[in-house]
Amino acid sequence: MLTLKQSRRLTTWLVGLAAWSVALLLFFPIFWMLLTSFKTEIDAFATPPQFFFVPTLDNYLHIQERSGYFKYAWNSVTIAFGATGLGLLFAIPAAYSMAFFETRRTRGTLLWMLSTKMLPAVGVLVPIYLLAKSLGLLDTRLVLVLIYTLINMPIMVWMVYTYFKDIPREILEASRMDGAGTLQEIVRVLLPISKGGIASTVLLSLILCWNEAFWSLNLTSAKAAPLTALIASYSSPEGLFWAKLSAVSTLACAPILIFGWISQKQLVRGLSFGAVK
Amino acid sequence: MNTSVMKSATTLPALPAAAPRRQRSPGWLLVSPSVAVLLLWMTVPLGMTLYFSLIRYNLLYPGENAFVGLENFEFFITDAGFMPGAINTLILVGSVLAISVVFGVLISALLEAADFAGRGIVRVLLISPFFIMPTVSALVWKNLIFHPVSGILAALWKLFGAQPVDWLAQHPLLSIVIIVSWQWLPFAILILMTAMQSLDQEQKEAARLDGAGPLAIFWHLTLPHLARPIAVVVMIETIFLLSVFAEIYTTTSGGPGYASTNLAYLIYNQALLQFDVGMASAGGLIAVLIANVAAIMLVRMLGKNLTDKS
């Protein structure tokens, strides 16, 4: 017979074994992509798949000349930061006013903003494409910045709002006594207090923009294409360079993975619109 | 004097005379920019879609924009791709939702069951696929895992003496479901795991002392506690799953035939490959309609849970 302590230990061990197995299984494709990125093209295509091989940095060293990586990466960076910055300019004042000057319409407005997310992107693909075309915005970074700002705005407003809500009003009232204007109040008092919340809002928006693939594939082709589109171009038959693809993919995903790991707790709050904390 | 000013005047303490310009609340002035742009974003494109859906509009034949009533809708619905597209959309959304909710609950319950070694790392590994961009996950699965010659699954099949399967050609929709589930199950795990951590441990301990087994605790305590987070997972995933596009675009291109075409891909195909704006717009409106019916049904189904628990 096992003692109670022994059986507890056995359960812990079994649970750990099961959890590790599931985790390694789910993580395997990412691990395999990382491994493949250090192979030669011949090793990458070998049958059966090679777990042990002589690693090479070739794919990373020649990433620029082989796929023009940096142009696409720069597009991704400018689009993601542009849309996030623009989104904050709209979201912070809106959240400030909703959190500190609540009216009976505030809740309705917030819910309405969320409901705009229920509109599937394909429903407006045609007009947006034609509008972009007639305004000469097709294949520009500007059009993606504008669209990403709009599609992420409800989440940003909602997230900043839940953080502002946690700030005691007295702090703001004190600064108001000192004669601070609205802008000063936001910039000098509110933002420093809530910089953690703003930072996780920024991270979430960057992640969503970086990974967005519906609009980027449909509205850009060469000039303004971000990394999502560069990688999609490998789906063509002539792009059968898997080691190269893996290296490009690893570089494209690494920053977002790290962002995600750092901010998982705060992301839950943002992604569930504050329903789960 | 508008209502927002009156309201703020009652909720705020009297302001000192030194700052007279602060007596007007900045309320709606600060909200209105975001409301205005979102309103434009909601109405203008949707209005255009509605208008295009009622006229003949093909980019290959400019100038022939006669009003045709509901003809585009008729053509879209009777198009060979519509039924498969609609059914595939439902299968895709339904099965990915089922997989992510069921396995999401089980996996996060497993993580909470015991404090084993390396739990933090397991957590990080489990949520990672959610942060991989859709085009990358589609191509990694297509080339490194599903590939019939040198993919991992082919090697595994051969190891057991079976004939390797050409996944994307023979089971296109199943393959897409697997890829998309791989991306969205981690989202469910992320949300449910966090929700489970907020479960009252004392309550659990009390139930255990009363003689409730782990299964009874899971069924009567953990699951009801998860109702709200599950509702959140279902709603958010539905929004994104209705517009799954990149995964199909980079792997099967909707084929073979219409075997893995969903409505999003069908509309893209009509509009940007066949230039039939009118018909694509009709399809877009149908997709919006389906999304809203789904949303209303979900809110009805889950609304009780949401209000009960809040």
Image (cartoon, rainbow, N blue to C red):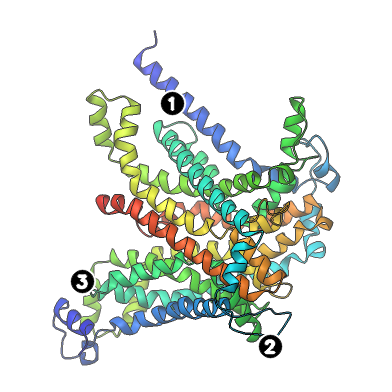
Badge 2 element: loop
- The span from disc 1 to disc 2 (Cα, nearest Å) is 72 Å
Q: Nearer the viewer, mark 3 or mark 1?
A: 1
- The span from disc 3 to disc 1 (Cα, nearest Å) is 48 Å
Q: Amino acid at mark 1?
A: Thr
Viewer-proximal residue, B36 or A124? A124
Asked if residue B133 shows in the view, the reply is no
Viewer-proximal residue, B129 or B117? B129
Q: Amino acid at mark 2?
A: Gly
The residue drawn where x is 35% and y is 27% is B215
* Residue that carries the numbered disc 2 in the rendered image: B63
The residue drawn where x is 82% and y is 43% is A45
Asked if residue B211 shows in the view, the reply is yes
Badge 3 element: helix
Q: Nearer the viewer, mark 1 or mark 2?
A: 2
- Specify the label residue A12 is tagged with: 1
* Residue that carries the numbered disc 3 in the rendered image: A170
Quadrant of the rendered image containing residue A111: bottom left
